Amino acid sequence: MIKASDFGDDFKWGVATAAAQIEGSAVEYGRGPSIWDTFSARSGKIKKGHKLDVACDFYHQYKEDIALVKFLGFKVFRFSISWSRILPNGKGEVNQQGITFYHNVIDECLLNGITPYITIYHWDLPQALENEGGWTSFSINSAFNAFVSICATAYGDKVKNWIVINEPFGFTSLGYMLGIHAPGKTGLNNFFSAALHTALAQAEGGKILRSEVSNANIGTTYSCSEIIPYTQSDNDVLAAKRVDCLMNRLFVEPAQGLGFPTANWDVLEKFQIEYGTWRLNDRMKFDFDFIGLQNYFPLTVKYNAFIPVIQAWEVKAKSRKKPHTAMGWEISAVSFHNIIKQFGTYPNIKNIIITENGAAYHDKIVEGKIDDQERIAYFELYLAALLEAKNEGLNITGYMAWTLLDNFEWAEGFTTRFGLVYTDFKTQKRTIKNSGYWWKEFLKT
Ligand code: NOJ
């Protein structure tokens, strides 16, 4: 059995959340609508028609929830700032109630000896900005920069750890290419323009934090998945390389001044030429103090000529009879190790924090308890792999479990439970799952 102390005394153990998924009070206290409010009001977009209006009511229960973070033994709490709570129209007038709310959250963390890590953008764009084109519009960058600057000025004295953007590939692909997340746009043109503006935003956001927050520790997070070719045929191997460009390399490489990864995929090469992205390579570069990696599953892919553009197809875990979570996501600690190693080979990455990792299961309360043994087994497996990677010399300095509470899991609504703490969405009662108690014991070791 591994122990928390095996990771060293300075290792940061945390739990991660995001504003839209937990806060609720979506139309109260001066908050303007975000794209997720609009999207969830459209029929058929979110499972069971769930909406963010109340979510976990963190807005009112943040004190109790931060007490839970402390009780479980975590020393870091990661949360995000709702852009439209600070700037109801995305830009212009600031909502003071919003500013005060995050001061309260930060103060409560500090009072309890918990270090706050703030994510500036975790997918909830103000609807007013989406009306002007959202991430596909060039004007998004000045609006984003102004928002970063407001956050830095308001909280920079108290908060030193910052994450500029959460999973750029996640929201640009699901929201602007496939249309299954807000704002529900589709197509390659939307995706590429959103990707370009996001790559600029991550670097420019970093630069603003650097100049406005003294002694800041600045990072940004990436979703990542080991991409495994189904067979060793040339076609499958090349298909895996294309998917790797898209899912793993698309945003981390521009931040390092390498531009977009065009070598393995002509589609990206055309994008670079058409949008002249190479001219922006310097603007997209920023020397992050750390990068956050978020891993949930590997992907096995196969060449498929009928799939437009990418010509690759996922061979699902279920069909290969591999262990998977309630999301259908394959469980593979070896792949977790491999993908961290892959990111660790970039010479300019100084420091890696796992900013999200966790698993959804169909939790049930039985006699007041949730005995989520599968989730405990998942954490044991993944943490052992993380320790191996760390002991191999990769500079991994922290781990944040996803997530504190069962919450609004985007297009899945409240049907998917990732929490260490069970949320009863009718009563807002929290019940610590056995995995939560497992963490409490683990963190003492
Ligand atoms: C990544 C996202 O950052 C988070 O918001 C989401 O809930 C988890 N993945 C699980 O899907």
Image (cartoon, grey):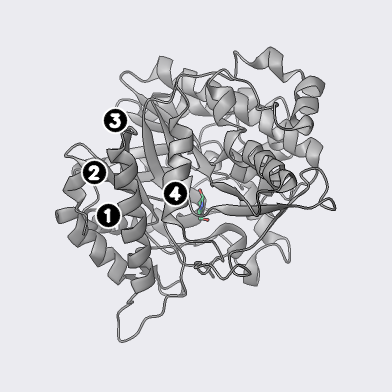
Please give the residue where the numbered disc 1 appears in the rendered image: 69
Please give the residue where the numbered disc 3 appears in the rendered image: 158
Please name the amino acid that badge 1 sits on: Val
Alpha carbon of mark 3 to alpha carbon of mark 4: how far? Answer: 33 Å
Q: Which labelled disc corresponds to residue 114?
A: 2
Alpha carbon of mark 3 to alpha carbon of mark 1: how far? Answer: 19 Å
Alpha carbon of mark 4 to alpha carbon of mark 1: how far? Answer: 25 Å
Foreground label between 4 and 1: 4
Alpha carbon of mark 2 to alpha carbon of mark 4: how far? Answer: 27 Å
Residue 138, quarter of the rendered image: top right
Q: Is residue 99 visible?
A: no
Estimate the x, y position of residue 105 in percent, counting from the top left.
Answer: 33, 45
Residue 130, quarter of the rendered image: top right
Q: Earlier in the sequence, mark 2 or mark 4?
A: 2
Alpha carbon of mark 2 to alpha carbon of mark 1: how far? Answer: 8 Å
Residue 232, compared with residue 342, is above or below; it is below
Q: Residues within 10 Å of mark 1 (few under 14, many from 20)?
A: many
Judge left or right: residue 34 versus residue 162. right
Along the line of sight, the residue nearer the viewer: 240 or 423: 240
Q: What residue is drawn where x is 62% and y is 44%?
A: 171
Task: Kindly indicate whether the residue at mark 4 contacts the one at mark 2 (C-beta within 8 angstroms).
Answer: no
